[in-house]
Image: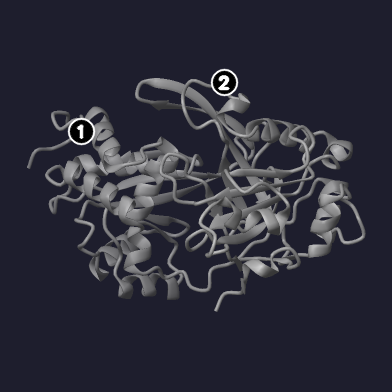
Amino acid sequence: MKKRYPFADLTSCDLVIDATYESNRTVKNVAGEPLAPLTGTGNQGGFRYCGPNKAPKLVVLYSTLAEPNWPDALDEENGVFVYYGDNRKPGYELHDRKAGRGGNQILRQSFELAHAGREGRIKVPPFLVFAKGEGRDAVFKGLAVPGAAHLDPSNDLVAVWKSVDGQRFQNYRAVFTILKLDVVPRAWITELQRGEALGASCPAVWRQWIATGKATALRAERVTRVRSKAQQLGDQRQREIAEAVHAHFSTRPHAFEHFAADITRLMDPNVVSIDVTRASRDGGRDAVGKYRIGQSQNCVTVDFAMEAKCYRPSSGLGVDVMSRLISRLRHRQFGMLITTSYLGDQPYKEIVEDEHPIVICSGGDLAELLISKRGLSSADAVRTWLDQTYPATSLPTDLQIL
């Protein structure tokens, strides 16, 4: 069972990765929120901080991890956290404090300091990441620092445009690294509240980041890579999006192949080319592509083959689909399966156990890409976008009518 801390103990307990910190269930207003007594910050909003806005002593980032228009996300395998700022409605400038509690100002300042050498990093407040638990409970997800190893300083904090009811506005998309630390000691929280960031209880991993700028990420390898049907299809919203995609292409499987090729490019910018082949007798339509490893001036490319299946999300794919894809892989190639459905247990186990180099992009994965990369947060939005981008009257130029 997960570690749980009752509300009465919140002023004295440590912060433990994935532990739950309980709210006061006898109090129905914000006074029963757990993060204020736990961290000394405010008790409302996604940004909560201790100390003045211009120089916070510590910052809490709180997320439901389930808001469709602002898809905050924690990549537990790589220790990377994506968080959207607090300018979430039209009519406000990117850094307007009236839109929130000054969270975007804190993001801009913290990321600038993080890239300004040791003298800058020493002024960056520790970021404590929490996710929504049951009811008003909060789950601790880790100690974070601005930036990530795979991003340069110009790409870890980006102002993105959003549109609501025809009104456009900007908000930040911030990328953090969760540091390799299983427990944030209470003694350090107390020191931070006094303004002593590098006090006696400061964790070594935080000192290392201040001194070198190198963030040692908390990476958590999955115990098993065989995902269940439920895991592949995702939540209700993802299922509805996959249903919308299936309905749009259900009578045009060849057009779905082109859509799947676009999804493959969307999945990874290192896909440098992908070409959809001509229709085969069984109505299937494969694609072949090249994937770049390294920088443009010193890269190598690896060939891959893509198989796309526009199946109803409730209809799983069997062994025959995987056998077909595996048979088409040559030496030093890998495969991609793009589907609106899911891969059954038996073929999934076989490709994992036999270590076949195949990437499974199931219905839930496909939906998440449209949400996070295209900003399409509902099935209705996806339908409108599909009608505009892949209209039913259009056909690929190389399509053969059988």
Q: Is residue 11 or residue 26 the one in the foreground? A: 26
Q: Quadrant of residue 108?
A: top right
Amino acid type, label 1 = Asp
Residue carrying label 1: 398
Mark number, residue 264? none
* Residue 17 image point, x, y percent: 65, 65
Q: Is residue 26 or residue 362 the one in the foreground? A: 26
Q: Residue at x 34, y 63 (%)?
A: 326
Q: Is residue 275 or residue 196 the one in the foreground? A: 196
Amino acid type, label 2 = Glu
Tell me if mark 2 has few (under 14), some (14-19) or many (20+) residues whose alpha carbon lies within 10 angstroms of its own: some
Which of the two discs, 2 and 1, sits closer to the camera? 2
Q: Is residue 113 above or below residue 257?
A: above
Q: Residue at x 29, y 61 (%)?
A: 342
* Residue 150 image point, x, y percent: 64, 45
Q: Is residue 244 or residue 221 the one in the foreground? A: 244
* Residue 12 image point, x, y percent: 76, 67
Judged from the image, the secondary structure of the residue bearing numbered disc 2 is loop
Residue carrying label 2: 93
